[in-house]
Amino acid sequence: MSTNNFSKSDLFHLHDIVQSSMIVYPKEIIIATLRDFFSKDSYYHYSKDQWGFANTTDHTDLPPGADLPTQFNQFGSNQEGLSTRLFIGENWRYNGIYYPAVLIKNGGSQYVPISINRDKGGIEYETISYVDGYGNQALVSKPAFFYTAGAWEGSISIDVMTRSLRSRDDLVELIAMCFTDVVFDTLYDVGLIVKPIQIGSPSESDDRNDKLFRQTLTLNIRTEWRREIPVGNLIDAILFTVNFQNLSQPDSPAAANLTINTEVSMTDMLLKM
């Protein structure tokens, strides 16, 4: 599964925003998940070209079944499926070029704090290994960045539009099972949680000389946002202090006037790297 989710804006970098999955990311993930899910089906098969767009080739003079995927057609193992049998895309841009169609759109979001102070002031540490000239090694933890985090809760609407009642019912059931259990763990790994799914009542309308059957699924989702503000440049130097004492006797006091202090600047460490 892959998406084309990226931002052209510099503001994410300028304000140290490392995650902000409110509208674009969830919508693209849902579309990519459905395309991958139905690409494995022989009947409601989704096929895409090398650019990720749905294959809608001309079927003039082609034999019946030429649009079936490789493992289901009878024209040899080297012939790929020529066309998609199901359209999956964003609602307003494509809006049902052909049917059956599965159209996805954002249903709105709201900010949900995960703590009373939005986790503001939290510090993430990183570990640096130092080795002296005698081969002694020490692990030193230093703050890497401050972080602030929160969550978004909203919904994604999936409109199913078909020319037949059975196709509409089949697609609604398959999509519901897909997000209820089949891909739940996969979406969890990419930072998107699908909460209980709501399925609206079916409807039908006149479309030229035919009927168009519709039904809408609403995915209630939860995602998070996060800022990581670097603080490494605030540390100019690290001070090391070594005390001498008899380690065989834990209660023995440290030797007076036998203390070594050394200071290692971050600039010196960077120059040695």
Image (cartoon, rainbow, N blue to C red):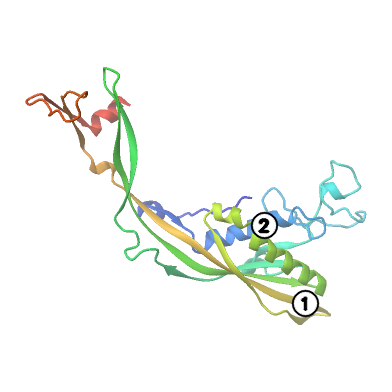
Q: In this view, does 15 lie above or below 215?
A: above
Residue 97 at least partly seen: no
Secondary structure under the numbered disc 1 in the rendered image: strand
Q: How busy is the neighbourhood of tag 2: few (under 14 within 10 Å), some, or many (20 plus)? A: some
Residue at image coords 49%, 68%: 153
Q: In this view, does 66 lie to the left or right of 220?
A: right
Q: What residue type is labelled 1?
A: Leu
Residue at image coords 47%, 54%: 8
Can you identify the residue that label 1 sits on? 212
**Place of residue 183 in the rendered image (x, y in percent of width and height, measured from the top left):** 64, 56
Residue at image coords 72%, 50%: 49
Q: Nearer the viewer, residue 104 or 121?
A: 121
Q: Which amino acid does label 2 sit on?
A: Val
Residue at image coords 78%, 55%: 41
**Place of residue 117 in the rendered image (x, y in percent of width and height, measured from the top left):** 31, 63
Q: How busy is the neighbourhood of tag 1: few (under 14 within 10 Å), some, or many (20 plus)? A: some
**Place of residue 157 in the rendered image (x, y in percent of width and height, measured from the top left):** 61, 70
Q: Which of 130 and 11 is in front in this view?
A: 130
Residue 251 at least partly seen: yes
**Which disc is residue 46 wearing?**
none
**Place of residue 148 in the rendered image (x, y in percent of width and height, measured from the top left):** 35, 57
Q: Earlier in the sequence, mark 1 or mark 2?
A: 2
Q: Quadrant of residue 107?
A: bottom right
What is the distance, in whole Å, between disc 1 and disc 2 at their CAs? Answer: 29 Å
Q: Quadrant of residue 140?
A: top left
Q: Nearer the viewer, residue 166 or 162?
A: 166
Q: Quadrant of the C terminus?
A: top left
Q: Quadrant of residue 247?
A: top left
Q: In this view, does 105 lie above or below 183?
A: below
**Which disc is residue 182 wearing?**
2
Secondary structure under the numbered disc 2 in the rendered image: helix
